[in-house]
Image: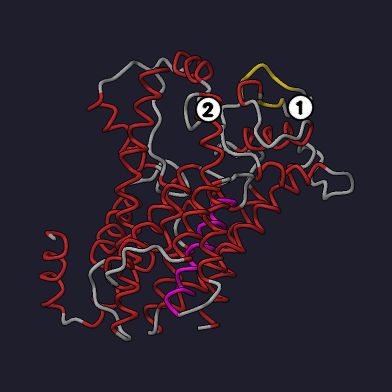
Amino acid sequence: MRAIFWAALLFHALGVIGLALTEKFPSPLDELAHYSYAVDVADTPRLFPEFASMRLQELDTELWTSTANYLGHPSPYYHLMGTALLPDVLAGPSSWPVGAWAMRWWNVAMSVAAMALILSAGLSFLAGVKERFVFSASAVLFPPLAVVGGIVSNDNFALLGAAMVFLGFARRFQGGVSAELLMATGLILAGWAKLTAFLMLSGVVAFVEVHSLVSRERVMLGWRQLLLLSAMFVGSIPYVVNLFVLGSPTYLAEQYFVELAAARDITPVGVGQYALTFFRGFLVTWSALEPANSVQILGLCLVLVLIVVGMRAPLRGTAERQNDVMLLCLCSGVAFLLVLPLHFYAGWSVHEKTGHLISSYARYYYPLWPGFALAIARSVSVFARLPLADRFPLLRSDLIW
């Protein structure tokens, strides 16, 4: 198990380090906006920024532009990145703005730490060498993880929270005493990083807890459930504050998107056409190098099929371990189905208000990927053990189900 763990972690680490070294700053994946946010809160520290007053920075002059910073995430990640602006911190290439080089290495460290937790948890769920190998490969080969791991992005902060929740599940299913503390900490971290990550992880935790209560015929909440509910409350605080201050859980730089839609000459569309744009965006952003080509999209379709099969496939090991892994896979899938329509509604609302078309980016769903990687490991394992003639009937029955 150790060899698989270290090989997979080294592969991920080399990938994000290579990206950090070679990707020109800023990356098109909102890196300038994340960097500008960090500089802003470093200049005027505050837990709840006034989003409407924040601007993007001009890289050549390091002066503030008149262009609005369209990000509206909670601030802790950006305060952490602000430490890169302190004197005597790693300066980096002379052509880069102050602190950007050090910020990238902060993100590399977070990404590698998160992957180490994910691999440790996933490998502890699985008994066979094949299952462990497939899980590790699936975990590190999710294209968006490498893309954001080497740039300044709060996705890495949220991924660390997701990894802690995943490790908490592994510890809990094995009877570890630190399980709920890990899960609670991960939920709070995700909540103070990004709303989509918080919703997905809260969904997975909630579904697992409900299943636990129902299966044990318990209606009384124990200290574990109360701890996790408290963590969800703490994680939701930024969005409750936004609701009172802005009238919405999240900030929308409305004028920025109106001007962007006009600059791109975007024609308003109906909900049906928007749905096509939304789901097409998920396909074309699956690849690390956007847009994805036909082969990469076919690869995504194969992955989705394996995930569906893996949510029901039997696994080597005890019946208890099979149930635990299946439960986590299924709850990850349910959380995905819960957040996807919310994401669609939010994007459609932005289009109605501003005319801008926002797609569904595959990288938004990375918090659920560890559960999906487990499903892939399950499905590949069962297919490998079946005679060739029995594989298609199993696949057909699972897809119909």
Name the residue at the right extreme: 88
Relative to 269, say whether 321 is above or below.
below
Frontmost of labels 1 and 2 is: 2
Q: Quadrant of residue 354?
A: top left
- Real-space Cα separation, disc 1 to disc 2, in angstroms: 38 Å
Question: On residue 348, which mark appears?
Answer: none
Which picture quadrant has residue 275?
top left
Residue 168 lies in the magenta stretch? yes
Residue drawn at (44%, 45%) of the image? 364
Image location (x, y in percent) of residue 102: 75, 49
Residue 64: x and y in percent read 73, 22
The residue depicted at 35 percent of the width and 58 percent of the height is: 332
- The foreground one among 2 and 387 is 2
Amino acid type of the residue tagged 2 in the rendering: Phe
Give the residue type at disc 1.
Asp
First to last magenta residue range: 157-174
Classify mark 1: helix, strand or loop.
Answer: loop
| Figure check: 67 above or below 229 | above
Residue at 66% in and 21% down: 53
Apparent side of residue 286 relative to residue 382 in the rendered image (left or right) = right
For label 1, count other residues whose C-alpha is less than 10 Å away and answer few (under 14), some (14-19) or many (20+). Answer: few
Main SS, magenta residues: helix
Q: Which residue is mark 1?
A: 60
The crowding category of the residue bearing disc 2, from other C-alpha atoms within 10 Å (few below 14, some 14 to 19, many at least 20), is few
The front one of 353 and 108 is 353
Q: Position of residue 13 (x, y in %)?
A: 61, 64
Mark 2 — residue? Answer: 244
Q: Residue at x 24, y 77 (%)?
A: 314
Assign a secondary structure to mark 2. Answer: helix
Residue 271 at what x, y percent from top left? 25, 25
